[in-house]
Image (spheres, rainbow, N blue to C red):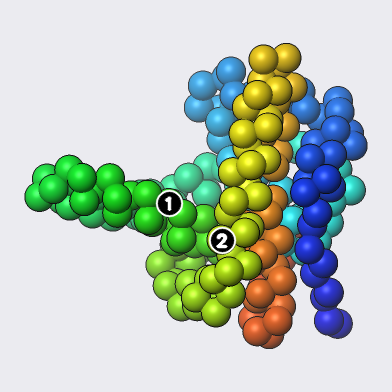
Amino acid sequence: MVIIIENVSFSDAFRYPFKKPKRLLYALFLLIPIFGWLILFGYLARLVNEFIEGRYEGPIKLNIMDDMSLGFTIFLKSLPFIIVYVILISAVSYVSETFGILLNLLLSFFIIPILQVNFYRKQTIESYFEFDILNIVKDNLGSYVVVILKQYALAIIFLVLSVVLIGIPALFFTGTIFIANFYGKCTEAKNIFVSKPEYEDQVPV
């Protein structure tokens, strides 16, 4: 079955977290150290997969135990990449602080977002190091830059709205929406679209 992934519009991305406004309260788990964070890690992984597959009906339902278990797994599997990244930036910054800052900005803009979405999709340690996925950025550089700029613009809007509180959970729900949409479109176009993780058949959405 061919999955057609359409571009998510800026207006749809903005409206997304408000389609099921009660679920904005899920962000309160941020106030619970460790356990709440793990729950949201797992929830975010499922949310990113929704975006990859082009589903924007509104925030999915949270499942505390399953999401906490998934979040713990996601955290452990991401540690090797985090360690390598910290060592790399620290080593470069030791040689030249300015170059370290520039490298960090470059990686944060062009590399980390797509690797992170790839990791949330495949959920393996190796997926954070699958640098071949960066070819979709190289082959669609103009589109990717627009996607990143739209992601930042949306974040700025929700940061402004944080003065009335709703901006904070809204930002959490949409923090990867454009990048995941880009990933879904490009991997489908290259016939490397990855099947959703098996856990999604077991967790209510």
- Give the labeled residue for mark 2: 145
Along the viewing direction, whichever of 165 and 115 lies nearer the viewer: 165
In the rendered image, which quarter contains the N terminus?
A: bottom right
Residue in the picture at 71% in, 61% down: 181
Residue type for callout 2: Val
Whether residue 203 is visible, yes or no, is no
Residue in the picture at 69% in, 50% down: 177
Q: Quadrant of residue 71?
A: top right
How many numbered marks appear? 2
**Relative to 190, is 9 on the left or the right?**
right
Around disc 1, counting alpha carbons within 10 Å, would you say few (fewer than 14), some (14 to 19), or many (20 or more)?
few
- Give the labeled residue for mark 1: 108
Residue 154, x across and y down, in percent: 67, 40
Residue type for callout 1: Ser
- Marks 2 and 1, the one that precedes in the sequence: 1
Residue 59, x across and y down, in percent: 81, 40
The answer for how far apart the CA atoms under marks 2 and 1 are is: 12 Å
Residue 115, x across and y down, in percent: 49, 62
Label 2 sits on a secondary structure element that is helix
Residue in the picture at 72% in, 32% down: 170
2 or 1: mark nearer the eye: 2
